[in-house]
Amino acid sequence: MYTVDTPDPGFVCNVLWTLTGDQDGTVASIDGNSTFTVQEGPFTPYNQLTEAQVLGWVQDALGPQGIANFEANVQGQINSILNPPVSPENQPLPWSNP
């Protein structure tokens, strides 16, 4: 987390986060960051922040659609690992000599 000393000492202005998905041992993740300019509610000193509190901020910043988009991205990565897409292969022309 990144902090600045205004409006309060240790004000969290940016949170780097990782969303990880695991489907039967197949793991994928996506990284992101959330920026904060105004903290709603009472100020909590940095050394008293909890993981749940900061995760709540990130989830609020992303909103339900943002969370769903990131979850779909991770699930898509897992699906591609479990069922790799078929890639076309470049073949020599059948009438050319090898």
Image (tube, helix red, strand yellow):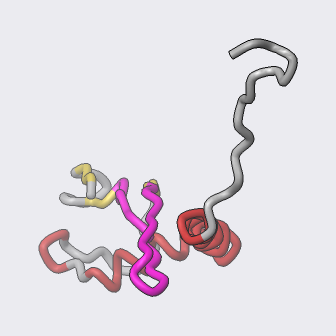
Q: Is residue 66 visible?
A: no
User: How many marks on residues?
Assistant: 0
Q: Nearer the viewer, residue 56 or 27?
A: 27
Q: Residue at position x 65%, y 71% from top?
A: 72
**In this view, which residue lies farthest toward the top?**
97
Q: Is residue 85 visible?
A: yes
Q: Position of residue 61 (x, y in %)?
A: 54, 67
Q: Position of residue 22 (x, y in %)?
A: 44, 80
Q: Which residues are magenta?
A: 13-32
Q: Dividing the image into 4 quarters, which one contains the C terminus? A: top right
Q: Residue at position x 28%, y 60% from top?
A: 11
Q: Residue at position x 51%, y 75% from top?
A: 59
The question of residue 40 being in magenta is answered with no
Q: Quadrant of residue 81?
A: bottom right
Q: Is residue 2 left or right of residue 42?
A: left
Q: Position of residue 92 (x, y in %)?
A: 75, 23
**In this view, which residue lies farthest toward the front?**
97
The question of residue 27 being in magenta is answered with yes
Q: Main secondary structure of the magenta part?
A: strand
Q: Dividing the image into 4 quarters, which one contains the N terminus? A: bottom left
**In this view, which residue lies farthest toward the right?**
95
Q: Is residue 20 left or right of residue 46?
A: right
Q: Nearer the viewer, residue 90 or 71?
A: 90
Q: Residue at position x 36%, y 54% from top?
A: 14
Q: Nearer the viewer, residue 79 or 42?
A: 79
Q: Is 9 drawn above or below residue 68 in the view shown?
A: above
Q: Is 19 drawn above or below residue 89 in the view shown?
A: below
Q: Nearer the viewer, residue 32 or 34?
A: 32
Q: Position of residue 10 (x, y in %)?
A: 20, 59
Q: Is residue 78 left or right of residue 1?
A: right
